[in-house]
Amino acid sequence: SSRRRGRRAGVRPGARSVTDAPHAHVPTASSGGVAMNSEPAASKGAQHAAAKWLVPAKSKYDFDSWNTSQMEFPVEVRHRAAIPESSRFRQFWSILLVFLLLYVGTLLPYFVAFYQLRIGEEREDEAVQVSFWVVDACFYLDLALNFFFTYEDSSGQEIFDLRKIGKRYLRGRFCLDVIACMPAEFWTVLLTAISAEGAASNGGMYKLTRLARLQRASRLTRMASLSRIVERWSNSFALLAMLKNVTFVRIVNFIFMLFWFVHILACGWYMCAALHLDPQQTWVARREIDYEETPLLEGSPQVQWVNSMYFVLTVFTTVGFGDIGAVTTGEIIYVSFTMLVGAVVHSIIVSEMIG
C-alpha cells in the first residue's frame, strides 16, 4: 500500500504521498518544461493541491509546532523577603508562638485577675511583669512578620507576593492583633482623657488604671492562631492526623477544652467582684474558707482561684449546692451568661463523644 511504500522511502507516517492526493497528475521529471512520461502535465491547481497533501499532519502533541509567542502565562511574583512555610525560621517561630499562646490562654488571665486586679492590696510580682513584657514584645514582632509569611490560596498554591500577603492580612485579623498588642498604659491615658472629671475625683485614677489592666485579657483573641497552627501541622505530619482520630486522644482533648473554659470563666467570676464598687457586697466577701469564718477576701490568690473554679464547675454541671450564689446585678448577669456557655459546651462535648 501507499503507507508501506512511504515508510520504506523514509516518509513520515503522518505525511501523505502524492499518489494519495485526489485528481493530481504530477510529472516525475521534466526537461525544458516537457514531461518525460506519457501522462499529461499537471495544472498549477493540481500541483498546489499536491503540495498541501505532502505537508506532514500536525499532532496535538507536537509541541515544537506550537506558536508560544502569542500565548500568555500567569507569572507568580516571588519576593526574597517572603518567608515560606518550609523555612526553618518559620517553623521555629510557630513552635515559639504555640508556647506563648498556651501562656496567654492559661497563666495570663490568672495573673490579670488574681494579681493585677486583686481586691485590696495588689501583688506586684517582678517575674509576672517581665513575662508580660516578653509576651508583648513577641506579639509586636509577630504583627510585623505576618506581612512576610506566605500562605496557600484556594487552589493550594503558595503565594509569595508581598502585596497579596499584606492585603490578605489587613483584611483578616490585623485589627484584632493590633488591639491585643496595645499596652495597658495606652488605655489608661485614653480613658483618662475621655473621663477627665472621673479621673480627677477621689480614687478615679485608681479605678481607671484597674480597668485599663483588664485590656490584657484581649490577648485571648490571639488564641485563634493556635488552631490554625495545629491544623497546618496536622496536614503536614501524618502522625498528628492519625492521632486526631484516636478515641483516647479525643477524650483527653475534650477534657482539656472543658477545663480551659472553666478556667477562663472562673477568672471572669472573680473579676465581677474585683471590679465592683464595694467588694464587701460581693461573693468573695460572703464566702468563708475555714472553720474560723475567715472570708475569702483575705485568702491567697490560689485559694480564691480554687473557689472560683469550684463555683463555675457547679454551674456547668447544673448541680448548684447553694453555698456560693449571685446577689449583685453584675453577678446575676455573669452567672446567667455562664449557664448559657455551659449548656452549649456541654452539648458539644456530649455530641462529639457520642459521634
Image (cartoon, rainbow, N blue to C red):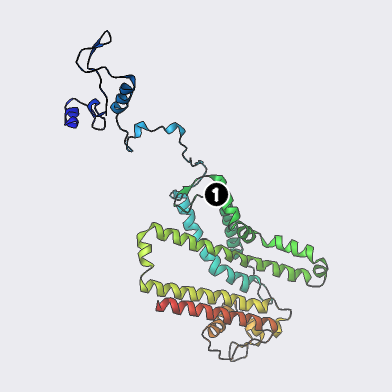
The kind of residue tagged 1 is: Ile
Give the x, y percent position of residue 212. Answer: 70, 66
At x 65%, y 74%, the residue is: 118
278 w.r.t. 90: above or below = below
At x 62%, y 90%, the residue is: 293
**Element assignment for label 1:** helix
At x 45%, y 74%, the residue is: 254
Q: Is residue 140 visible?
A: no
The quadrant in which residue 53 appears is: top left
Dot 1, how many residues are within 10 Å of its Cα: few (below 14), some (14-19), or many (20+)? some
What residue did someone put label 1 on? 165
Give the x, y percent position of residue 131. Answer: 58, 62
At x 54%, y 68%, the residue is: 105
223 w.r.t. 158: above or below = below
The N terminus is located in which quarter? top left
Q: Is residue 48 left or right of residue 128?
A: left
